């Protein structure tokens, strides 16, 4: 896909696309629109982590960052939070995102180690 075609598909300028390609633009702004246009996982596109594919069938009415069904929360590539915008998270510094991730991992471990509620 050309830079101009990608720019039209995601609503960014061709210059912004070039900056993302050249890694001169490191901000998260626009990364979700790029990922959606390219049909790839935003985390993979931004940092090269996780699977490249979103694993979700294309549906023009469904955002790739929202869960269609809470029972599918374990699926890769979907944004699991309903009260936190992906843009807010990606606007954090790398250091702050690492703190959020470590905190969440700790909380999940503590919930897993807790006896089941009756």
Image (tube, helix red, strand yellow):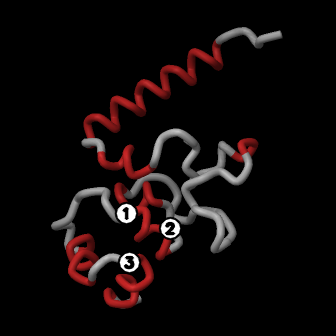
Residue 91 higher or lower than 60, as above or below: above
| Circle 1 residue | 31
Residue at 27% over, 80% down: 13
Single out the mark in the foreground, 3 or 1: 3
**Circle 2 Cα neighbour tier, 10 Å, few/some/many (<14 / 14–19 / ≥20):** many
Cα–Cα span, label 3 and label 1: 11 Å
Q: Position of residue 113 (x, y in %)?
A: 64, 13
**Circle 3 Cα neighbour tier, 10 Å, few/some/many (<14 / 14–19 / ≥20):** few
30 or 19: nearer the viewer: 30
Residue at 39% over, 83% down: 6
Q: Which mark is residue 11?
A: 3
Query: Between disc 1 and disc 2, whose residue precedes?
Result: 1
Residue at 35% over, 65% down: 30
Q: Position of residue 107 (x, y in %)?
A: 52, 20
Quarter where residue 94 is shown? top left
Q: Which mark is residue 40?
A: 2
Quarter containing the C terminus: top right
Single out the mark in the foreground, 3 or 2: 3
Residue 53 higher or lower than 96, as above or below: below
Secondary structure found at label 3: loop
Q: Is residue 91 left or right of residue 108?
A: left
Query: Between disc 3 and disc 1, whose residue precedes?
Result: 3
**In the orientation shown, which residue stands out farthest toward the left?**
24
Quarter where residue 15 is shown? bottom left
Cα–Cα span, label 3 and label 2: 16 Å
Residue at 66% over, 11% down: 114
């Amino acid at each position: 896909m050309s830079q101009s075609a990608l720019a039209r598909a995601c609503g960014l300028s061709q210059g912004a696309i070039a900056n993302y390609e050249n890694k001169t633009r490191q901000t998260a702004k626009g990364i979700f629109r790029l990922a959606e246009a390219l049909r790839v996982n935003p985390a993979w596109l931004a940092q090269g982590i996780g699977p490249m594919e979103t694993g979700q069938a294309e549906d023009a009415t469904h955002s790739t960052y929202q869960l269609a069904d809470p029972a599918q929360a374990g699926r890769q590539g979907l944004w699991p939070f309903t009260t936190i915008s992906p843009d807010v998270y990606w606007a954090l510094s790398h250091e702050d995102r690492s703190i959020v991730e470590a905190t969440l991992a700790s909380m999940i471990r503590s919930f897993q180690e807790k006896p089941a509620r009756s």
